[in-house]
Amino acid sequence: DGGITQSPKYLFRKEGQNVTLSCEQNLNHDAMYWYRQDPGQGLRLIYYSQIVNDFQKGDIAEGYSVSREKKESFPLTVTSAQKNPTAFYLCASKTSEAGTDTQYFGPGTRLTVL
Amino acid sequence: SQQGEEDPQALSIQEGENATMNCSYKTSINNLQWYRQNSGRGLVHLILIRSNEREKHSGRLRVTLDTSKKSSSLLITASRAADTASYFCATPFVRQLTFGSGTQLTVLP
């Protein structure tokens, strides 16, 4: 059963805490992405990784950090420096084959700051 | 960064009617994609149309692309209640996809 999974589905954070969102894929995709979605809005890119041990900042990277130690995994840490982290977080992956732009999305994690 | 913008922001129709959503973008593209998002879920890829294509069909979906106007439309024919979702267009930009803010489609039974 191939796909991309995210955990947990719901996450609650107290102010000042760091939390880590998990993203795992078994699609053998090289590229992985993290997006943030606020209510009624589109997706904004936080970080992306084209290959293991390499990642780049997206449009809204401040207050977030990532790692890419394994091809299958791309965890996102929401740090205390992110002042308004309550949002829906989506992870996606994509093959690196030339001319292929379609991304495959996980089910998302909803983060709420208490 | 370039970004697609969907129009209308919200659309409400009766089951069986057709739904049309539009997307405008800013710069030249190689392709344009449409995705669907059910409430509280991840996005699902629907269809990709390349810049040298003017129209593409997939089941009840029909996508058009007008590169001279930098616009695309998504038509869903004979809509069903299960089509209720948000629909996003996405365009590739420097190894990324940029998404519009979406059209919320509600299909009433």
Image (tube, coloured by chain):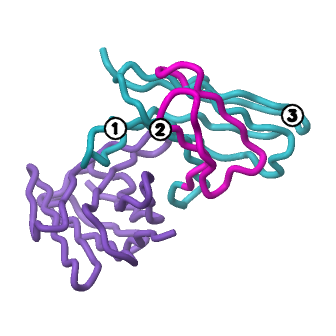
Quadrant of image for the C terminus of chain B: bottom left
Which secondary structure, mark 3? loop
Q: Chain of mark 1?
A: A
Chain shaded purple: B
Which residue matches tag 3? Answer: A14
Question: Whole-Å distance between the Cαs marked 2 and 3?
Answer: 32 Å
Identify the hue of chain A. Answer: cyan
Question: Whole-Å distance between the Cαs marked 1 and 3?
Answer: 38 Å
Name the residue located 32 percent from the left edge and 74 percent from the top edge: B28
Position of residue A91 relative to residue B38, above or below, is above
Residue sticking out furthest to the bottom: B69
Disc on the earlier residue, 2 or 3: 3
Do tag 1 and tag 2 residues touch (Cβ < 8 Å)?
A: yes
Q: Amino acid at mark 2?
A: Gln
Q: Which residues are magenta?
A: A44-73
Position of residue B17 relative to residue B42, above or below, is below
Position of residue A36 relative to residue B41, above or below, is below
Depth check: A114 or A1 in front? A1
Which secondary structure, mark 1? loop
Which residue matches tag 2? Answer: A50
Residue B8 locus on image (x, y percent): 38, 75
Membership of A57 in magenta stretch:
yes
Residue B81 locus on image (x, y percent): 26, 50
Question: Whole-Å distance between the Cαs marked 1 and 2?
Answer: 8 Å
Name the residue located 11 percent from the left edge and 66 percent from the top edge: B53
Position of residue B54 relative to residue A65, above or below, is below
From the viewer's perspective, is the residue at label 2 or at label 3 nearer?
2
Disc on the earlier residue, 1 or 3: 3
